[in-house]
Every structure is written in structure tokens, then in C-alpha cells.
Amino acid sequence: MRPNSTLIFQLYTGREGLPVPGARVIVTNPATGTSRTLTSDNSGKTPPLGVTAPDLSLSLAPDPSALPYSRYNARIEAAGYIPVTVTGIQVFAGVEAIEALELAPRPRGPEGDEDVVVIEGNALEQSVPRDPDSIPPDDRRAIQPRIQREVFIPEYITVHLGRPDNASAQNVTVPFPDYIKNVASSEIYPTWPENALRANILAQISFALNRVFTEWYRSRGYTFDITNNTAFDQYYVHGRNIFENISRLVDEIFNEYIRRKGALNPLFAQYCNGTTVTCNGLSQWGTVTLAENGYSPLNILKYYYGNDIEVVSTNNIQAITSSYPGTPLRQGSVSPSVRILERELNRIRRNYPAIPFISSVDDRFTQETTDAVIAFQKIFNLSPDGVVGSDTWNRISYIYTAVTGLAELDGEQEPLPSDPPSGILRQGSRGELVKLAQYFLRVISKYYEAVRPISIDGIFGPNTTAAVRDFQSRFGLTVDGVIGPVTWNALYDVFMGIANTSGLVVPYPGTPLKEGSRGENVWLMQDYLRTLSEVYPIPVIRADGIFGPATREAVIAFQKIAGITPDGIIGPETWRRIVAARLL
């Protein structure tokens, strides 16, 4: 049977802040037993793999004679990362499937277990009605009890992987657009007409934003925003594959939602499949019929929720500060927004080097800008047309936030300890040792979704306790929120695994590097200086692990730029500033 679809893998770490190149991906078709091996490039992507899927018509009927998608399995291995096995990757005819995985750096020490992702069937195949207690009253004047004063798009949303009352179920904190892409890929079929897809995605966004806005779970004492249990909320399968067209649509409209006219709050847009389960809301299968009959997304939504609804957007996206200028940017455009775009692309390229450098950052959209935009679009599965519409703009803003979010982790001023710290820390503790523990936890939270991010203030308060408990639960320790010897050892090992794997947090080696030095640390500094030379007036050098006169001149040039004594020696301060500059 000839391939009629494609499957790609996109591998990253640090909330998409860093790609994982050189990963080995073994893809198996369980139906035939055949396997193919792929390798990720310097953007963390594998080449498209041709795969087979059932006939398209099966996904357009509520009661197909056979499953409308194929399933594939994969094992992902990369040096320094915990291996991952994924089963049940779903592939539909004519739609590119994307398995985007965040790999976790392996803790220092003996190799541990692998991570396993099991992708179950689509929610359309389920028959679970929503629990009435999970449905807020829909006052058509839209005055619901609420806590938030304004609607915003959260940068992250915390999902409970189970029923609300299942205390043993894991919480994961994921970027909001990625959450919606996952839900849409789990709740509907990507082969549906685009207007049906848009209507369903808008309902899913509104459903989630209503939970966030009303603090439905947090006001009841829970530590999450939403569950993945379809009896209460939306179907989210952690680690599952998504689809190219759904990803593109979500990047375009993730900041849009449904509300009733004159209301503030997002509508609790209840929905069901419309066949095995019916409800007072949108019928997912019904949207297909309406779209095929020419209904627009808004008219589909009005059909189910009433004529008094509207679709609105907000640029109040927490932690993502830049907003779409309103009209697409393309070659020839002249606007201050072009300067923002070029600056963000140049920063992103330091982590994703396949993006060409834009030499002149100004208000003019040149051929260089077009080339950089196209490269970005190819990496992040957008239409590579060189035009910056809302989908490309929003994705650039999000990735820029991710890569600069990693840069803030270089805030540790003192040399890191060469061994795990000692001492008991618990709620109420204060001081420099608490700051170090918070720093470890904050770095770890960027690479492990189960650990919530915290501030570094030297005060061991409730948030730090909660993050410690997250960490202990994730790594199989006694969950007591106290940092004793066992937790200190684990924190240190996980942190050092991140440092050694990603190169993000690179501790000073303890002795200065100077002319005549050799080894891996010299090579690392040469590589960083070579990267910085693309932006700053630093001589271009070769990374060979030998500290010669050329390297010394490059170090002196950097020290002059950074305001450090230009002695050509990489001591603690010069080391720290080079690492920081490479990330900024």
C-alpha cells in the first residue's frame, strides 16, 4: 500500500527553548512489524516519513465501518536524555501528523527508567456524558461567580491527569496553545472541513478559559486549572501527536474565544459528540454537516449556543508581551513591528541555528527577513510563505518567550557547589541555601512539566513547598515538602543532568582558562564566542579545544564589550558573562 500521509517528529527541551538534534527515532508499524530509523536535525526535526492510513471517507462518518486512522509506535533516544517510548501515534490520510515531544535531561548518575506515552483513542469514540456538577450555570446575562477581573490567555495551564478527586494523578503544566492543539487532536478528526475545525477549536478554547477565569478548580482548593477527564472537562493526552492543520489553526486563533454579547467571561462552551452522547451545547459531528452546508465558524457556533454570542480576541497574553500588529507583514512592509519581528527572530536563531541571521534590524521587511521567516515557518510547521500573519506572529512571540525564559536562569551569581549541599530546609527556612534550592527548582521546572516554576527570594514559603513536593513526586521520593539529604542529592543530580546535557547552565570549572589551556571547557567557550561573533564585534575563531592567541584575542574583545578587565583570561566572572551573553 502506497503512503498517503506523513509523520514527523519534533524534539525539544526547556519548553521548546532548545531543540534536541541528533536524536535517534525508531518508528514501527505494529500492523506489519516493519521499522524505520530517523535522525533529528539541528532544529530537532526528523525528515517526513511516508506512512499509510485508512481511506479519508472513514473519518467523515459518525459510524465508520473501521477505525479511521492508523497507529504507529516509536522509540526516541538521545544522548543525555531519558529515552521515550510512544505507542498509538495516530495517522490520518492526507494530514501530516506531528509527534512533538519534550525530552527530559537524564539526571547525573546511573541510567534510570524510560518515559512511556500511551495514546488512546479519540474522544469521539467515547460515550461518557459530562458530570452535571462540573457545569457552571449559563446566565444568559453572563454574570457568573468569578474571581478574575479580566480575561487573559495564560502562558501555561496546569492539567490534572485524572478525575478531580484522584489525588494520586499527576499534574502537568503545559503552554496554553500546546494544550489546545492536544485537545483538538484528541477530541475531533483533523480531516474535517476547516470551518468545522475552527468552530470546535473555539469551543475548546472558551471551555478552558472559562475554567481559568472562574478559577473553577483552584477556588475549590485544587492545585490545577482543568482535568483531562471527559466526565468533567476536555480530553488531553499528555505526549500525544498532533496534526499540522490543527497546529496551524490554533497558532492563528488561540487568543480568540466565545462570549455572550455584553458579557466579560468566556462562555462555558459545552459540547459532546452528538451521537453516543448528546448535551445542551455543540454537537461535534453536527459541525461537520453544517460546514459541508456552507456555514461559517461563527454561524455554526450560533446554531448551537444562540444568536447572542460573539467571537472576540484578547492580546492580554500573560508573559507574552508583543501583540500582532493587525495586518500581515511581508517583504516591502515598513513598520516598527518589523523591528520587533527581526529582533525576536535573531534571538531565536541562537537556539535554532537553521534560521538565517538578519544583519540589519530596522523597520524594513527585506529579503533577509523573508528568508528568516520562511526558515522559522518550516521548523515550526507553518505554511512557509514568508508572510507574517497572526499564526506566524503568535508562534514567534511564543518561541521568543521560551528561549528568553531560559536565559533568565543564568541568574546564579555565586559558583555552584561541586557536591550536593547539606542541611535541612522546610517551610519557614530562609537564607542563601534556600535561594540555591529555589534556583535548582526553577531550572528544573523549565525541563520537567510536573514541577511548577517559583521565584528565587530566599524564603521557603508555600510555593517553594509545593514545588518541592512536585519534584519529590516526579522522582519517586517521599513527598513531604522538606529538603533533606535524599532530596538534596536528587535536586543536585537532576540539575547537573540539565547542565551537562543542554549547556544552558554551565558551572565554572574551578580554574581559569588562559593561553595554553586545552580540553572540553576551552572548546565550549570557543563555541560560545564563535556564536557571539555573529552579533558582536568579536573575532571569528575555530572551536578546537586549544586556547591559542586567536582565542585570547576573542576573549579580550568580549571583555571590552562586557566592561571586564581585558586580560584574555576566562576566570569566574568572564565565564559567567560569556554564558549569559550567549543566551541573551
Image: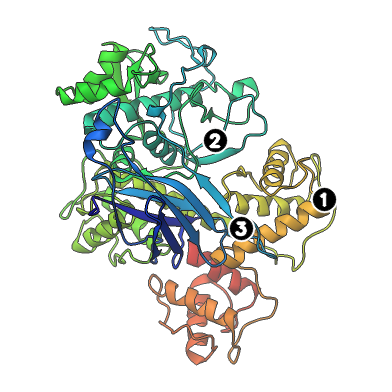
Going by the numbered disc 2, the residue's amino acid type is: Thr
In terms of depth relative to the viewer, which is nearer, 42 or 73? 73
Query: How many labels sit on residues?
Result: 3
- Image coordinates for residue 17, horizontal then vertical, percent: 47, 55
Going by the numbered disc 3, the residue's amino acid type is: Gly
Tell me the residue that label 2 is attached to: 158
- Image coordinates for residue 316, horizontal then vertical, percent: 41, 33
As drawn, 52 above or below 302: below
Q: Is residue 19 left or right of residue 50?
A: right
- Image coordinates for residue 451, horizontal then vertical, percent: 62, 44
- Image coordinates for residue 92, horizontal then vertical, percent: 29, 43
The answer to whether the residues at label 2 and label 1 have Cβ atoms under 8 Å apart is no
Is residue 40 in view? no
Give the structural element (helix, strand or loop) at label 1.
loop
As drawn, 297 above or below 445: above
Q: Earlier in the sequence, mark 3 or mark 1?
A: 3
Give the structural element (helix, strand or loop) at label 2.
strand
Q: Is residue 34 left or right of residue 559?
A: left
Tell me the residue that label 1 is attached to: 484
Give the structural element (helix, strand or loop) at label 3.
helix
Q: Earlier in the sequence, mark 3 or mark 2?
A: 2
Which residue sits at x=34%, y=40%? 323
Going by the numbered disc 1, the residue's amino acid type is: Gly
Residue density around tag 3, few if under 14, some if 14–19, many if 20 or more, within 10 Å: few
Q: Which mark is residue 411?
A: 3
Mark in front: 3 vs 1: 1
Which residue sits at x=76%, y=41%? 481
